[in-house]
Structures are given as structure tokens and as C-alpha cells.
Image: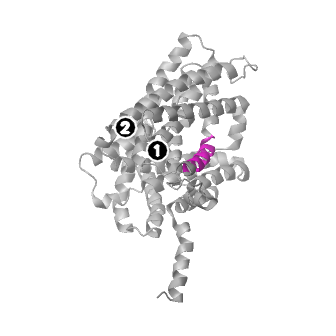
């Protein structure tokens, strides 16, 4: 028989449980980080850019930079320990394994910071995943290290901080043409890629993440989609690898095609911005043509980037309705709310806060720091994904079908986006915009 005291404790536990869920903790810690930065807590982040061995030994591995790296690691460990403590995990085991994952993430940023690597458009996420994968498939992952692989928490916290960089003012700067191309590209390419994946018997999670990666903005869109649909992190790592591997040759071949076929610079830039899946590759490819082409590409890519939050919100509702169970009954508002990933609300709230309530000067001052913090969280996440993944899982038949669907979707993206670029930026419908 349950006593009144026990009943009261049970009700209190139920009231607190939503507040101590991983999603809400990610939102809370993400906003704690944002609030600290806005209020003046601005630690010097480590620098990872280098071009020669002297830069690597004198700057990246210099004493000051190592101190900054350790300081950031301690900060992330303390924040993450809060999650472990409130969700009844083992804090000592977490603290024992966290330095290893943080070291893998930092090594990934050092590898991606090389000037030659940057020029090819390879990002730190692929190195973080590869380093974790190397450990898991050679020496293995001991039990004490698994506690620190809090992949979903790292991703969700990073995404909340990412929201602070998605500003409505940037959307206005991108203009109606950039927004129009972004909407038309995202909707058409997403649908085609998803249907192609399903035709190749790729499961819904894989198909949804791939369609978002191809149509919106590559890695960031895939991460947001995985969180929105609560997808398999190993599939996310595979999609991320596809994005980065396919982007490299496209970054070189597309500028060559623009020059060879005499495509106008502005049209070519808009084509690059709507097709290449990483912002770095858009900038690098645009530089191969001209400054106006680069600027047009960046603006179009920016227009697609700002659709991440909208897409995550829509995908959450769609995913809930699509997977409503054998009863085939439409879920009510309460069910949708329970399934809705709360970090998406944190992402949107951060975007609104930094778009309309924070002083624009403060937004610009903190942009670099927040980008560094977001990168650190994502590096932890992808190192953790690598530690949780086996090579055999990447070689399954479904992975091959997924790759084929991804390439097919990207091929449609190339053709469709080029057509839209000519219509919107080629002077056929409106005067050619200036991007000098």
C-alpha cells in the first residue's frame, strides 16, 4: 500500500523528470554557455590553424595554446558532468574517460586546421569520427571510456549554441533571390533524394538524414535531422562521411565546369552555394572563379543554412505523424509534445534571442567564441560516434544503397540548382544582382 509521503515523492519525481531529461539539460547548459558569453565570460579558445611545422610546434602546440586547450576541456567536463549527475550516471567513470574523447576531438581540429586540408574543404568532423573509429576497431573501447561517450548530449548542446549564429538579419541580407532559390532547392531536392533512397530500399532514418544533408547544408543539417527524428548515430556518421567525401571532388570540378562552359560568374556562384554541402567548400570553390562568384555562393549557402531550424521543426512533426504506431491513430498534441526533441526549441529560442534581443555589436563580438564552443561540442560528439562504430557496420549492403541514393540525389541537386541559378541570377526573370 502506497503512503501519502510515497505518493508525494512519486508526483515530485514525475514533475522533475522532464526537466532532467537529456534534451532539457542540453538546452539549459547551452543557454548557460550563451548567457555566460554575453555577460562577459569569454575564455581564450585554443587556436588550431597552421600551415607549416613551425606553426604547429610554436603556436598550436605552444604552452599558451595547450593551457587554453586544457582550460576549455575542464569547462566542458564540468558542464557535461552535470548531465551525468542529474541522469544518475557515474561521474567518476565519466571524468576518467572524458579526457580521452576530448583529446581525440582536439586532435581532429588540429588535423583539420592545416591550410592544405582547409583548401580541400575537409572538416574536423570527419577526422574526429575517423580517430574514434580507429580506436574502436584496433584496441577497442574499455568500459570506463564508454561512460564519457555522451554523443546525443554533445550534439544537442552544440545545436543549441548553433542557433545563436542563425540570424534573421543574415536572412534579410541574403535577399529574396537567395531565399527563393534556397526554398526551391531544399523542397525539391529533399523529396527526390528521399524517394530515391526509399526506391533503393534504404530505411526511413537513413533516407531522411541523407535527404536533409543533400538539400540543406550538409553536416549541420544531418546532425539537426538526426536529433529531430532521434535517429541512429552510426547512420549519421556514415552520412557525414558521404557529405565530406563527395564535396571534395565537386569543389574542384564545378569551378572548372563553370569556366569551361562559360557560365556567368554570378550564376556559377549561386550554383556553387546551392549545391556544395559545406560552407568552407563554397568559399574555396568561389575563390577559384572570382570575388562576385564567391559572394553570391556564400549568400545562397547562408539562405539554406537559416532553414535548418525550420526544417528540424517540420521534420519532427512529420516524423511523429509518420511513425504513429500500429493503431494508425493520429497522435494528439500531448504525444507530439512528448516526442518533440526539446533541443529544437532551444535552437529556435537562441536564434530569436540573438536576432532581436541581443545588441548587434555583442553578437558580432561573440560570434567567433560561440563558433569555437559549438565546434568543441561537435568534435566530442563525432569522436564518440567513432568509438561506438565498427567497420563491419559501415560495410553492410544498406550502406552501399545509401551511398548510391546520396550520389543520385546530389546529381539531381546539381542539375536542378543550375537551372534555378540561371532563372534567378542569370537575368532571365529579374535584373542581375551585384555581389562585388
Above or below, 145 relative to 412: below
Q: How many marks?
A: 2
- Residue at (63, 44) in percent of width and height: 310
**In the rendered view, does 292 fall on the left or right side of 231?**
right
Could you say where residue 350 lies in the image, as x and y percent from the top left? 63, 53
Q: Which residues are magenta?
A: 306-319
- Which quadrant would the C terminus be assigned to in this image? top right
**Which of the 4 image quarters holds residue 274?**
top right
Residue corresponding to mark 2:
398
- Residue at (39, 33) in percent of width and height: 401
Above or below, 133 relative to 4: above
Q: Does residue 403 show up magenta in the picture?
A: no
**In the rendered view, does 33 fall on the left or right side of 207?**
right
Using a 10 Å C-alpha cutoff, classify the residue at mark 1 as few (fewer than 14 neighbours), some (14 to 19) or many (20 or more). Answer: some
Could you say where residue 158 lies in the image, as x and y percent from the top left? 52, 51
In the image, 396 versus 421, the foreground residue is: 396
- Residue at (61, 62) in percent of width and height: 334
Our reading of the magenta stretch's main secondary structure is helix
Residue corresponding to mark 1:
205
Above or below, 434 relative to 118: above
Going by the picture, which residue comes out furthest to the front?
327
Amino acid at each position: 500500500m502506497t503512503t501519502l509521503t510515497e505518493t508525494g515523492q512519486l508526483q515530485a519525481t514525475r514533475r522533475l523528470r522532464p526537466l532532467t531529461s537529456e534534451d532539457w539539460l542540453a538546452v539549459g547548459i547551452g543557454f548557460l554557455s550563451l548567457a555566460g558569453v554575453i555577460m562577459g565570460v569569454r575564455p581564450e579558445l585554443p587556436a588550431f590553424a597552421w600551415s607549416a611545422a613551425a606553426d604547429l610546434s610554436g603556436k598550436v602546440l605552444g604552452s599558451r595554446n595547450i593551457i587554453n586547450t586544457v582550460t576549455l576541456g575542464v569547462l566542458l567536463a564540468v558542464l557535461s558532468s552535470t548531465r551525468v549527475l542529474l541522469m544518475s550516471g557515474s561521474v567518476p567513470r565519466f571524468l576518467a574517460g572524458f579526457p580521452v574523447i576530448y583529446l581525440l576531438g582536439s586532435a581532429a581540429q588540429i588535423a583539420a586546421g592545416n591550410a592544405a586540408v582547409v583548401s580541400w574543404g575537409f572538416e574536423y568532423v570527419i577526422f574526429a569520427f575517423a580517430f574514434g573509429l580507429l580506436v574502436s576497431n584496433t584496441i577497442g573501447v574499455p568500459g570506463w571510456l564508454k561512460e564519457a561517450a555522451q554523443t546525443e548530449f554533445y550534439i544537442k548542446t552544440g545545436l543549441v549554441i548553433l542557433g545563436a549564429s542563425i540570424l534573421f538579419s543574415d536572412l534579410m541580407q541574403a535577399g529574396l533571390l537567395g531565399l527563393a532559390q534556397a526554398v526551391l532547392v531544399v523542397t525539391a531536392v529533399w523529396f527526390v533524394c528521399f524517394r530515391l533512397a526509399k526506391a533503393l530500399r534504404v530505411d526511413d532514418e537513413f533516407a531522411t538524414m541523407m535527404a536533409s544533408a543533400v538539400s540543406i547544408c550538409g553536416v549541420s543539417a544531418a546532425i539537426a535531422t538526426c536529433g529531430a527524428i532521434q535517429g541512429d548515430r552510426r547512420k549519421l556518421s556514415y552520412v557525414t562521411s558521404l557529405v565530406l567525401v563527395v564535396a571534395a571532388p565537386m569543389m574542384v570540378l564545378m569551378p572548372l565546369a563553370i569556366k569551361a562552359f562559360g557560365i556567368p560568374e554570378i550564376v556559377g556562384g549561386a550554383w556553387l552555394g546551392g549545391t556544395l554541402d559545406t560552407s568552407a567548400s563554397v568559399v574555396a570553390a568561389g575563390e577559384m572563379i572570382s570575388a562576385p562568384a564567391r559572394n553570391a555562393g556564400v549568400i545562397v549557402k547562408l539562405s539554406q543554412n537559416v532553414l535548418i531550424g525550420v526544417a528540424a521543426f517540420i521534420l519532427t512533426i512529420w516524423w511523429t505523424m509518420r511513425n504513429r504506431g500500429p493503431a494508425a491513430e493520429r497522435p494528439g498534441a500531448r504525444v507530439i509534445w512528448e516526442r518533440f526533441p526539446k533541443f529544437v526549441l532551444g535552437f529556435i529560442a537562441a536564434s530569436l534571442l540573438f536576432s532581436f534581443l541581443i545588441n548587434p555589436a555583442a553578437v558580432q563580438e561573440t560570434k567567433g567564441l560561440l563558433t569555437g564552443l559549438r565546434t568543441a561540442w561537435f568534435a566530442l560528439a563525432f569522436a564518440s560516434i567513432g568509438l561506438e562504430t565498427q567497420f563491419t557496420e559501415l560495410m553492410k549492403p544498406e550502406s552501399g544503397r545509401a551511398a548510391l541514393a546520396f550520389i543520385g540525389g546530389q546529381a539531381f541537386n546539381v542539375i536542378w540548382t543550375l537551372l534555378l541559378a540561371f532563372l534567378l541570377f542569370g537575368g532571365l526573370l529579374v535584373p542581375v544582382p551585384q555581389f562585388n
